[in-house]
Image: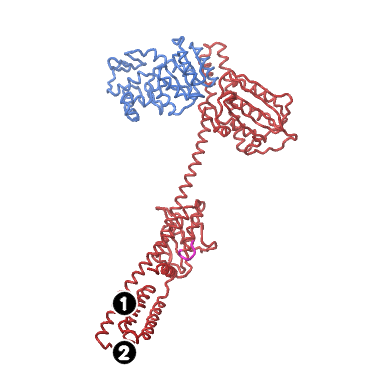
């Protein structure tokens, strides 16, 4: 496995969850540190230098969203939120604060591990790769050239920008607000109908079956995710 | 002007007379005739000493008096009779209506004109005064009613004040009908007379008014009955809120325009007051609803959190074992299995708590009273909470000579499990939790203390409330059920529970159980704490 020695910090006030995650992740070759409170999580991040943080939102001292905000003041370490809160608002809040992904409890270990790998790969491979390939889709950032199943896809400038942003964040949830802000600027953060239109057009051009998207999938009420194909 | 006050009260009487019934104008004309006669007699007495022209001035007096007191008609009559009497009794040739000299004819004509003009002016003055007084009176009545009903907070009181005022003004009975919210009938809500009886037909008219929003009764065009009876709708915008029924004391009366106007103003005032009360009531209901929704949301939140948290560990462990069981060491696999066992256990405890809560709430919790040894309970509790207390040290201080206590072993065990769970949850890892017990004055006291951050004074009285979560730690997992269940159980035992907190020692939860000689049969759930001082 390519995850040898990756350091993961688990921040959760539930001892049983921490113990179970530690056992499972160590079994997969990760190096684990634990924190039971938000404060501990913040200080452990500075001491342990993790490559990724798994963060619960319901902590006894700080709210998880606040922990994300404080971390984002000085570090871009990937943060995966692991929480029982399943409401879209909670997800959006955490993602907008800077979390990379959101997994709701209860979760299957396989899914969590996949998200972990995707996040780690993104940070590892983010050094200006001009060609992004996801299964049948490839995006050549240097030439603004998109192919699907080997054939060129003609995209409008806006469609290309949406696809590029999703591709650069491949595998993680991008909230409506983040996408709008990146493409139209901060004045359009609430205009999510723009997105529906462009994402719909994109899907018609790149999806084999636009009614059952397999590349750009909708995270209901939260945003979109570009599937990495693993 | 100096007679103003005097006149006002007289005219008040006059107005009221007009309100109750149209007084006989004939009487006023008689008075006019009488006053002219008196002046004639006085004139006869004065005739030897005065000029004729001066005597004619005397006749202006009955004209003015009639104009001011009895109105336009009597004033005209006085003018006319004055001219005739003066002519007949004083102007030569006496005792005929013939006029001898040009001079006297001129005097008669001037007198007649002056009498008519002054009479007219005086009458108009009187009318205006009357109107002003009437306006003043009406304003006063309206003011009184609005002040009275503004102070009332109850619909029935408002309607009573309204009916009372209408009854006073109209000089009769007034009744207010409202639609019964539960049945399709009109209900008499307030009346000036408790035994005001309306027959079925009159009820039907009231009903019609409620449905159509138009006044009905004698002289109002609709339902002209034999009896003097009027119904007015009390409406706010397009909704008819109530019906006002009026029965004047005098039969065969119709309402004057002014009366009708006044009544309609009254009903408007009443409508505003009713709507105000309705709004207040709706606001109150909305508040209660919001409270219960909040409670509901809290319940759902806590259930979802407390069931899902252990489920998360279980699912994580199970999916690990299922997918890639072989790649883990035996030791790791044991950790997964232990996790599953412990978390299943925790879920079970949570469900037990929920069920206890429901039983406590519905009053179906049965106490299984037996002689219990506290030392024994504590032993079981420590075994039960081994997982939760991991990493903490627990000190126990229980005197060996502690008497046995009549209690439900399982329920007291749950109280202590909840208290220890809390102590572990709200204090830092590896802190020292202590359990101590002692006996005093037929009461057994048991304290669980943790060195965690003290609960602020303001929150202390709420920690035993259902679904209450400490503000200072509301991010922590938990239902807000544990302590309220403790309270319910302890009170069902006839004891009480309290907390005291200070930065020096953290939080101390203490419960008291009565130590009785006789076994208890039926223990009622006690409201409020017993001996908490």
Chain B, colour shown: red
Residue A53: image x %, image y %?
A: 46, 17
- Find the residue positioned furthest to the left: B102
Instruction: Give me the chain letter of mark 1.
Output: B
Residue B326 vs residue B232, the one in the foreground: B232
- Residue A174 in view of the camera: yes
Q: Residues within 10 Å of mark 1 (few under 14, many from 20)?
A: many
Q: Within the magenta stretch, is there residue B171?
A: yes
Specify which label sits upstream in the sequence, 2 or 1. Answer: 2
Q: Between marks 2 and 1, how big is the CA–CA gap? A: 22 Å
Above-or-below relation of A224 to B323: below
Q: Under tag 2, what secondary structure?
A: loop
**Location of residue B504 by image quarter:** top right
Q: Which chain is blue?
A: A
Q: Residues within 10 Å of mark 2 (few under 14, many from 20)?
A: some
Image quadrant for the C terminus of chain B? top right
Image quadrant for the N terminus of chain B? bottom left
Residue A118: assigned label: none
Residue identified by numbered label 2 = B96
- Residue B18 in view of the camera: no
B376 to the left or right of A216: right
Residue identified by numbered label 1 = B115
Give, as a single range, the part of the protein colored magenta.
B169-174
Residue B449: image x %, image y %?
A: 62, 25
Above-or-below relation of A5 to B54: above
Residue B498 vs residue B251, the one in the foreground: B498
Q: What residue appears at the point 60 percent right and 19 percent down from the top-left corner?
A: B392
Residue B49: image x %, image y %?
A: 34, 85
Instruction: Give me the chain letter of mark 2.
Output: B
Q: Within the magenta stretch, is there residue A203?
A: no
Q: Under tag 1, what secondary structure?
A: helix
């Amino acid at each position: 496995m390519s995850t040898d020695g990756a350091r993961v910090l688990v921040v959760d006030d539930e001892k049983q969850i921490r113990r179970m995650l530690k056992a499972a992740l160590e079994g997969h070759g990760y190096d684990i540190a634990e924190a039971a409170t938000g404060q501990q999580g913040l200080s452990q991040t500075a001491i342990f230098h993790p490559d990724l943080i798994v963060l619960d939102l319901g902590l006894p001292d700080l709210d998880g969203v606040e922990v994300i905000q404080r971390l984002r003041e000085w570090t871009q370490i990937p943060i995966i939120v692991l929480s029982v809160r399943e409401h879209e608002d909670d997800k959006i809040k955490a993602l907008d604060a800077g979390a990379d992904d959101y997994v709701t409890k209860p979760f299957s270990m396989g899914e969590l591990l996949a998200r972990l790998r995707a996040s780690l790969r993104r940070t590892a491979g983010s050094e200006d790769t001009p060609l992004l390939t996801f299964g049948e889709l490839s995006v050549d950032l240097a030439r603004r050239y998109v192919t699907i199943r080997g054939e060129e896809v003609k995209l409008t400038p806006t469609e290309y920008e949406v696809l590029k942003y999703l591709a650069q964040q491949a595998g993680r949830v991008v909230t409506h607000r983040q996408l709008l802000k990146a493409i139209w600027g901060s004045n359009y953060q609430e205009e999510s109908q723009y997105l529906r239109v462009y994402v719909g057009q994109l899907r018609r051009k790149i999806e084999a079956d636009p009614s059952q998207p397999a590349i750009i999938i909708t995270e209901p009420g939260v945003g979109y995710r570009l599937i990495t194909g693993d | 002007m100096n007679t103003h006050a005097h006149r006002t009260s007289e005219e008040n009487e006059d107005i009221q007379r007009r309100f109750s019934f149209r007084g006989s104008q004939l009487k006023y004309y008689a008075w006019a005739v009488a006053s002219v006669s008196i002046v004639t007699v006085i004139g006869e007495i004065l005739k030897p000493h005065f000029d004729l022209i001066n005597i004619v001035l005397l006749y202006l007096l009955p004209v003015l008096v009639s104009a001011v007191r009895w109105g336009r008609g009597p004033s005209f009559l006085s003018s006319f009779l004055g001219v005739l009497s003066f002519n007949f009794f004083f102007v030569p040739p006496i005792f005929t209506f013939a006029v001898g000299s040009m001079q006297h004819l001129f005097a008669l004509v001037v007198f007649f004109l002056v009498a008519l003009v002054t009479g007219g002016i005086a009458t108009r003055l009187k009318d205006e005064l009357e109107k002003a007084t009437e306006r003043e009176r009406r304003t006063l009545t309206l003011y009184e009613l609005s002040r009275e009903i503004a102070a009332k907070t109850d619909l029935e009181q408002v309607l009573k004040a309204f009916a009372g005022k209408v009854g006073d003004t109209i000089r009769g009975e007034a009744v207010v009908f409202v639609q019964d919210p539960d049945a399709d009938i009109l209900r008499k809500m307030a009346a000036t007379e408790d035994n005001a009886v309306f027959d079925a037909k009159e009820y039907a008219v009231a009903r019609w008014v409620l449905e159509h929003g138009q006044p009905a009764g004698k002289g109002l065009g609709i339902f002209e009955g034999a009896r003097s009876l009027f119904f007015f709708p009390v409406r706010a915008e397009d909704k008819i809120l109530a019906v006002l029924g009026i029965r004047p004391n005098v039969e065969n009366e119709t309402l004057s325009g002014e009366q009708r106007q006044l009544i309609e103003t009254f009903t408007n005032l009443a409508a505003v007051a009713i709507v105000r009360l309705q709004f207040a009531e709706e606001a109150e209901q909305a508040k209660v609803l919001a409270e219960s929704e909040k409670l509901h949301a809290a319940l759902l939140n806590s259930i979802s959190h407390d069931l899902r948290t252990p489920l998360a560990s279980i699912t994580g462990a199970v999916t690990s074992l299922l997918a890639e069981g072989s790649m883990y060491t035996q030791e790791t696999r044991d950790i997964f299995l232990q996790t599953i066992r412990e978390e299943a256990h925790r879920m079970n405890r949570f469900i037990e708590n929920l069920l206890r809560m429901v039983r406590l709430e519905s009053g179906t919790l049965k106490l299984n009273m037996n002689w219990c040894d506290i030392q024994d309970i504590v032993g079981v509790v420590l075994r039960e909470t081994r997982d939760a207390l991991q990493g903490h040290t627990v000190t126990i201080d229980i005197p060996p000579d502690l008497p046995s206590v009549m209690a439900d072993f399982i329920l007291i065990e749950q109280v202590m499990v909840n208290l220890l769970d809390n102590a572990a949850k709200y204090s830092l890892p590896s802190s020292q939790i202590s359990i101590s017990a002692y006996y005093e004055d037929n009461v057994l006291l048991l304290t669980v203390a943790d060195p965690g951050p003290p609960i602020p004074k303001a929150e202390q009285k709420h920690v035993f409330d259902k679904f209450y979560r400490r503000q200072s730690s509301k991010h922590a997992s938990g239902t807000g059920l544990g302590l309220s269940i403790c309270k319910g159980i302890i009170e069902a035992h006839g004891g009480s529970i309290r907390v005291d907190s200070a930065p020096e020692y953290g939080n101390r939860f203490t419960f008291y159980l009565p130590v009785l000689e006789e076994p208890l049969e039926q223990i009622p759930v006690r409201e409020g704490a017993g001996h908490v001082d």
